[in-house]
Image (cartoon, rainbow, N blue to C red):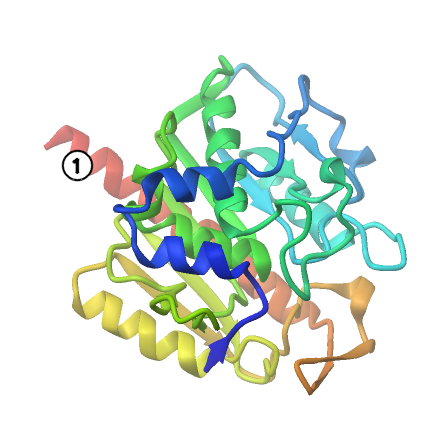
Amino acid sequence: MTIRWFIPLVAGAVLASCPAGAQGVLGIATQAKDLILPSSPSVAATVNGSRMALLKPDGPGPFPAIVLHHQCAGLRTLDGKPNRSMGEWARAAIQHGYVVLLIDSLDQRGVASVCEGSKNGVNFPRGVRDAMQAADYLRTLPYIDKKRIAHVGFSWGAMVALIGGSKELREVLPGSQGFEAAVALYPGCFTIRPSNGAPPFEIVRNSIDHPLLVLMGDKDVETPADECVRKLQAAKEAGAPVEWYVFRDATHCWDCDHLNGTSRTRRGINIVYRFNPGITEEAKRRVFEFLERTWAAGRTAVRQ
């Protein structure tokens, strides 16, 4: 599948030429101002997924940490309601002993949605830079284990996680150590083909260089799993540390109870969202087991 609507033409052209277009990528990633991140932890019970938040378990740490990155409508739905799925994921991470930085790439920039394309400088490179700056910020906090920080993204945020998993883009966004692991839930794995004739750009690249888990649904018509599986397999065969799982009978945004039963048409495709609590719980189990395996492998490598 090809796609033309998620990213400005110039971004597609510059990304395709990394690292030669380093200054261009940095320019695209800085069209929008940097986020002002939460300065102190919030009480987990008060977080409903409607605003950025920093959350931590009780105790001094050091704790592993997760940067949670939302779907294309940010931390509020298009009708202004809280994105409850992000609040639930944040609370689940706290229960598993993680510090959580729930970020919002849209709100401070006056953007309601990037579901139909980039707005006000909010594009994929900006999203990657947001996530990396969030990771850098977490490393300044005294209760964080600086070698156990993961990026967990959903739909738009999942595509940001996939792109940010490749070293080419990170190398042209200076000043960040990035992540030790990443998880992408129901991403698109499209080929972006700029209409200005610039070379195509793959969201999934063979240069992914840290452990990556991708979770998808077989009934997802918005970001179909088949294309992801094919490209992830090619990346794995090229040596990328990727793994994936496709849930049966899962639509796009299977964890979004606030969207359950709603429908919309995008790119001529009728999309119906179905919240599936069983798959949502299974997805959480797989995410945290993957992260624990990744941290354990890192500890073993250090000892050796």
Report the residue marked by disc 1. 301
Q: Residue 292, relative to residue 146: is it above or below?
A: below
Q: Position of residue 283 (x, y in %)?
A: 54, 62
| Image-quadrant location for residue 117 | bottom right
Q: Which residue shows up at 41% across the image and 24% down it?
A: 145
Helix, strand or loop at label 1? It is helix
Nearer the observer, 88 or 188: 188
In the picture, measured across the screen, residue 261 lies left or right of residue 247, that is: right
Q: Position of residue 151 (x, y in %)?
A: 47, 44
Q: Position of residue 125 (x, y in %)?
A: 48, 47
Q: Which residue shows up at 26% across the image and 46% down it?
A: 20
Q: Which residue shows up at 29% across the image and 40% down it?
A: 296
Q: Residue 55, relative to residue 195: is it above or below?
A: above
Nearer the observer, 23 or 208: 23
Nearer the observer, 267 or 80: 267
| Residue 62 visible in image | no
